[in-house]
Amino acid sequence: MTPPPSIGDQRLPLSGAVNFRDLGGYLTADNHRIKRGLVFRSDHLSRLTMEDQRILQDLRFKVVCDLRTVCEQQRAPDLLPLDGSIRLLPLPVQAGGFDPARVRERLQAGDTSWLSMDFFIELYQRYLDDFGPVWGRIYNLIASPDNLPLVFHCTGGKDRTGICAALLLKALGVREESILLDHDQSNACNAQRLQPIYAEFAALGIGPEQAAPYLQAPIEPLVAMLEHLEKTYGTIEDYLQRKAGLDETTILALRSCLLE
């Protein structure tokens, strides 16, 4: 059996985005493979250097989908080439009152009630239930080769981005073990960037175990979300048609575009 792609195979060598990864290379259950160089997932792009931007231009990126909240986007706008060669599409994903841009303020005010695995399990389910049209918008773009290469991202590239990636991989027929592996790779990519953030949390009296559900990319919320999808909607095709607004033709086009 062919091993799954490694981080070294998938990760773009960018200075300003540490979790920018190609979703290509994974095998499907029926032995097709996702084409490389077409769809990427990432952390935020507000730290991109001029050299990073040149790399994206050389790879002929067409679209950036920004899943961050409006406040996140305003505080740290994506830095893209000024020539307009890459289209920026803001698609804010915010469940209820939880805005990652306000996390430090909540913690400084002593609000740590949301730092639990149960909170993030519920959050993932809300992202699934409430934001089908956003995922559908992205998948509709991906189904048209004219929009590729494309990258979707949030802040850390692990939760909202992780859900978008997991649903896409599932729609393409990738086995769940590979979907979970892809999700877990965010931990390795983000490790160095997270060290000073853990220190900030520690200064507020929040230890690494308490901070982990938020700062890491734990498997449990994604597993629970996939179970919720099956229990509530049935198959991934049922979900995409009922909640994401995709028709069967678009789902087939998605697979035709991305699988070899």
Image: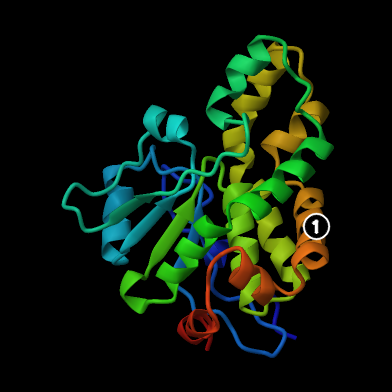
Q: Who's the residue at 36% across and 78% down the image?
A: 145
Q: Is residue 141 above or below residue 255?
A: above
Q: Is residue 35 above or below residue 137?
A: below
Pick whichever, 73 or 156, lies toward us: 73
Pick whichever, 20 or 257, lies toward us: 257
Q: Is residue 187 above or below residue 260?
A: above
Disc 1: which residue = 223
Q: Residue 224's quadrant in the figure?
A: bottom right
Within 10 Å of disc 1 (Cα), the crowding (few <14, some 14-19, many 20+) is some
Question: Relative to 192, is 176 on the left or the right?
Answer: right
Q: Who's the residue at 40% across and 27% down the image?
A: 75
Q: Is residue 113 above or below residue 182?
A: above
Is residue 38 in view?
no
Tell me the colour scheme of the image. Answer: rainbow
Q: Who's the residue at 76% across and 37% down the image?
A: 213
Question: Relative to 88, is 116 on the left or the right?
Answer: right
Is residue 210 in view?
yes
Label 1: state its secondary structure: helix
